[in-house]
């Protein structure tokens, strides 16, 4: 993909790094793999909002197996200040006990969210947890964890598109974009 396809989101510029076609092919391939791994287990797919919603929709269609869908939201801020703890906001009627869980993340960078969710789910007495991420930043990992599956490994640059955002903008972009310098005109 070429730099002439730069996009401005908010006050920042982004260059395309992974095309819509490449994303769709890789997500479809991942869905088929996970469908085979989880076939007959009636898994519950748990998406971490907001960034995973496009990835999860495409993934579940490609898996093409009976499953349940749920979403959770992580909250660590009170206003503009971090509370220092992570709170999980879940629908009140979800029970994970004895379930096979597929945890769906848009991006794993430090690993903090993934580690926290694994601990939370095993405390809830799940049968098993498998994790899948659209993007994995191995150079950013600070916790001794990585996703079981991921579609793409990327550098430690800020990215948007395909559900990922900058200040809640850019989620609608069909390609993945990486932060870049403002173009000179």
Image (cartoon, rainbow, N blue to C red):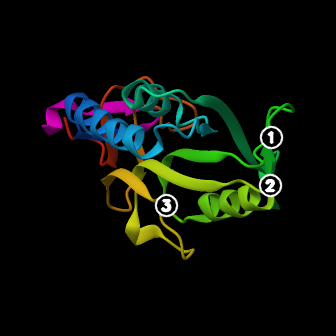
Please provide percent x and percent y for residue 80: 77, 48
Q: Which residue is mark 2?
A: 124
**Residue 85: assigned label:** none
Helix, strand or loop at disc 2? Answer: loop
Do the numbered discs 2 and 3 sit on residues whose CB atoms are within 8 Å? no
The Cα atoms of the two marked residues, 2 and 3, are separated by 25 Å
Q: Is residue 5 magenta?
A: yes
Please provide percent x and percent y for residue 88: 78, 47
The Cα atoms of the two marked residues, 3 and 1, are separated by 28 Å
Q: Quadrant of the C terminus?
A: top left
- Does residue 83 show up? no
**Residue 109: assigned label:** 3
Disc 3 crowd, CA 10 A, few/some/many (<14, 14-19, 20+): many
Q: Eyeballing the image, is 156 above or below 152? A: below
The Cα atoms of the two marked residues, 1 and 2, are separated by 8 Å
The tag earlier along the polypeptide, 2 or 3, is 3
């Amino acid at each position: 993909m070429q730099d002439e396809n730069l996009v401005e989101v908010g006050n920042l510029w982004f260059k395309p790094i992974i095309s819509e076609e490449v994303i769709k092919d890789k997500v479809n391939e991942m869905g088929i793999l996970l469908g085979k791994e989880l076939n007959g287990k009636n898994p519950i797919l748990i998406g971490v909002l907001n960034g995973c919603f496009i990835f999860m929709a495409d993934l579940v269609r490609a898996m093409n197996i009976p499953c349940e869908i749920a979403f959770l939201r992580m909250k660590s801020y009170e206003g503009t200040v971090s509370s220092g703890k992570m709170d999980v906001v879940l629908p009140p009627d979800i029970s994970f006990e004895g379930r096979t869980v597929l945890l769906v993340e848009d991006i794993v960078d430090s690993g903090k969210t993934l580690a926290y969710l694994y601990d939370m789910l095993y405390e809830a007495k799940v049968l098993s947890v498998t994790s899948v991420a659209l993007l994995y930043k191995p150079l950013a990992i600070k916790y001794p964890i990585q996703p079981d599956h991921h579609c793409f490994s990327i550098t430690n640059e800020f990215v948007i598109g395909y559900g990922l955002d900058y200040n809640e903008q850019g989620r609608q972009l069909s390609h993945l974009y990486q932060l870049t310098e403002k173009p000179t005109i």
